[in-house]
Amino acid sequence: MYDLVVVGAGPAGSRTARRFAELDNDVVVLERGEVGVPLACSGHVSGDVWGFLPDGAREKLLGNEIRGARFHVGDSSYEFYREETVSYAIDRVVMDRVLADEARDAGATLHEDTPAVSVDERDDGVTVETDDGTTYEASVVAGCDGPRSTVRDELGLDDPDELLQGVLGFTDEGGSNDDDLVDVYVDVPDFFGWRIPRGDSVEYGAASSGSPREELEDVAGVDLSSFDRVCAGQIPIGPPRRTTTDRGFLVGDAAAQTKPFTGGGIVYGMTAADVAARHIDPDSPGTLGIYERAWRDELGRDIFYGKMIRKAYALPRPVQRAGMRAFQGEINVHMDRPTTLLNRATVGRVFRNLLGV
């Protein structure tokens, strides 16, 4: 019998497995397919990600250093930047594999091509069954299996507030490390589109509740059918009311531990994995409730402010343009922490922009 079954070997799942294995727990990870494949998420991250990765990972993963963004509202554009690097374009497939290797090195067992199809939660433990009929017994189960989480459904937990459709396309349209600004297309309904220079290629993407591919092509003037590679996925927004049961807990996209204003969840998910390992004792299931409170204490405020920023996407275009003009210029904001938006330097610049000085 295992201490923990982790379903899903994305960043949140591999980090959860590693951290619990490092505490001498017997951990098994069940990954639906091959680790990192298919790609369904952009690899645009803050520098905080390096704190979750081993020494030497940066050289394997780094595609480009980003220092800001151009926001496009209709025919108008507004730049937000810093002199130093604010974020990074990385290789998501390689990152997932590095994190999975870290989990293995810590002692976790990983089974690829092993979809979990059911979870039976009992007073004395859980049984996770895979599609070939194999069962895994454990004290607790961690659902790290993405936006359409089987574990979440099997445990009877609510879905996220929203599930947006996302699309990614990659082209070698002259991507260069000289290009260090991300383009953001606000005219994609419900969310936004983006263009990320990745060093050796360029990534276009969009997310919305409608048809993100058509919407991206319309606002960015691209034809995804001509791209080298196109993939799709879903983005969960808004955590459910509960992410734990008596013997199960959710981490990462399964718990919608994402930024409501960008959809990114790599750092949030791995942060929650560390919180889970600090507070959950598989031999004491009552500790799952501590994790529920602790991860919300850690991430809840930034998720709340992220929801406020998200509401600005629905503002009338003249109001958006006014806001962009007020905030444009050099930024002093952490991309994972919207609570840093209202710092003294930013507020001062907003007033100067409003006053035209």
Image (tube, rainbow, N blue to C red):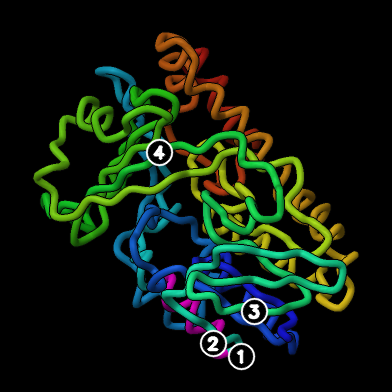
Residue 104 has which mark? Answer: 2
Q: Is the N terminus in the top left, top right, bottom left or bottom right quadrant?
A: bottom right
Mark closest to the chain's N terminus, 2 or 3:
2
Does residue 98 show up magenta in the picture?
Answer: yes
Secondary element under disc 2, as helix, strand or loop, is helix
Secondary element under disc 3, as helix, strand or loop, is strand
Quarter where residue 351 is shown: top right
* Dots 1, 2 in contact, CB < 8 A: yes
Q: Amino acid at mark 3?
A: Tyr
For the point 37% across and 39% down, the residue is 69
Provide the residue designation for mark 1. 107
* Residue interval drawn in magenta: 95-105
Quarter where residue 129 is shown: bottom right
> Is any atom of residue 340 visible in this view?
no
Provide the residue designation for mark 3. 136
Q: Amino acid at mark 1?
A: Gly
Q: Residue 352 location, x and y as percent?
A: 53, 21
- When the figure is inspected, residue 125 is found, relative to residue 195, above or below; the finding is below
Q: Residue 95 location, x and y as percent?
A: 42, 71
Provide the residue designation for mark 4. 165
